[in-house]
Image: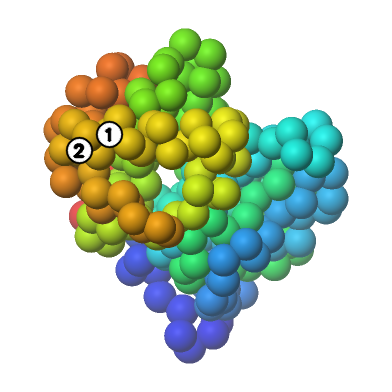
Amino acid sequence: MDQSVSKEKSGLLRRMNPADFALLAPHLHHRVLDLKVPLEMAGEPIKSVCFLESGLASVVARNRPGMDTEVGIIGHEGMSGTALVMGADWAPHDCYMQMPGEAVCIDLEPFKAALQKSPTLRAFLLRYAHYLHSQTKSTALSNARAKLEDRLARWLLMCDDRVVGDQILITHEFLSVMLGVRRPGVTIGLQILEGRGLIRSRRGEIVIRDRDGLIAVADGFYGQAEAEYDRLLGKLGAVSG
């Protein structure tokens, strides 16, 4: 095991059965993940699994260049490579860093060997995969039924669950992909939320000023998937206990 590796900052590794973590530990290594670094590419073999410690990764669906949107978000509560847990070797979507961070990673073969050896590891990680599917369902529902400012409020709350402090570093370009809208729509949504005193928006930076107000604007589209994570794995956003 890389001497710089610790399980303290990964929500999943902290919650993992000690015997299961012991199977992974000798093969874990620490990675610094810069902006836009890919963790998976759609249609390509998954080469490693990363348990995020910080930063944010986006799971992005695409049918052709310029036609892409975020369908999932991963922070320190989660991991990449969930397709491996469900028995597939290929990534169904792109997954890349939208905010730089760090992760504890394991290569494909030792990860698959641990899944085969342990009677509990796969079941534990399947609970996370189930949560991620619940998050995707909530994203689909909000994209279909919510107003732009409601969707933006939900996304900012999801980021707030996963970053330290109230500052979110994100460009309008990334936000347009995350929300599946053009950049002028992003500007309008931010102006609406800022006009209500819920955020402060500057170029490349959003500061949350009123989290409860954002929850109200999200209008029920935020909270269901988060409650599912709490039920299956422990409180979302907590990395201890």
Characterize the local packing of mark 1: few (<14), some (14-19) or many (20 or more) Cα atoms within 10 angstroms: many
| Image position of 226 (left or right of 115) | left
Residue 2 at x, y percent in the picture? 54, 85
On screen, residue 84 versus residue 25, left or right, reads right
Q: Secondary structure at mark 1?
A: helix
- Examine the rendering and report whether any part of residue 131 can be seen: no
Quarter of the image for the C terminus: give it: bottom left
Q: Secondary structure at mark 2?
A: loop
Task: Tell me residue 231's x, y (percent).
Answer: 31, 30
Name the residue beneath numbered marker 2. Answer: 198
Name the residue type under label 1. Answer: Leu
Whether residue 16 is situated above or below residue 234 in the rendered picture: below
Please state which of residues 88 and 138 is positioned toward the viewer in this rendering.
138
Which residue has dot 1 on it? Answer: 193
At a point 65% along the width and 41% down the height, the residue shown is 60
Q: Residue at x 57, y 71 (%)?
A: 34
**Quadrant housing the N terminus:** bottom right
Q: How many marks?
A: 2
The kind of residue on which mark 2 rests is Leu
Gap in Å between the C-alphas at discs 2 and 1?
6 Å
* Vertical position of residue 32 compared to residue 103: above or below: below
Dots 2, 1 in contact, CB < 8 A? yes
> Disc 2 or 1, which lies upstream in sequence?
1
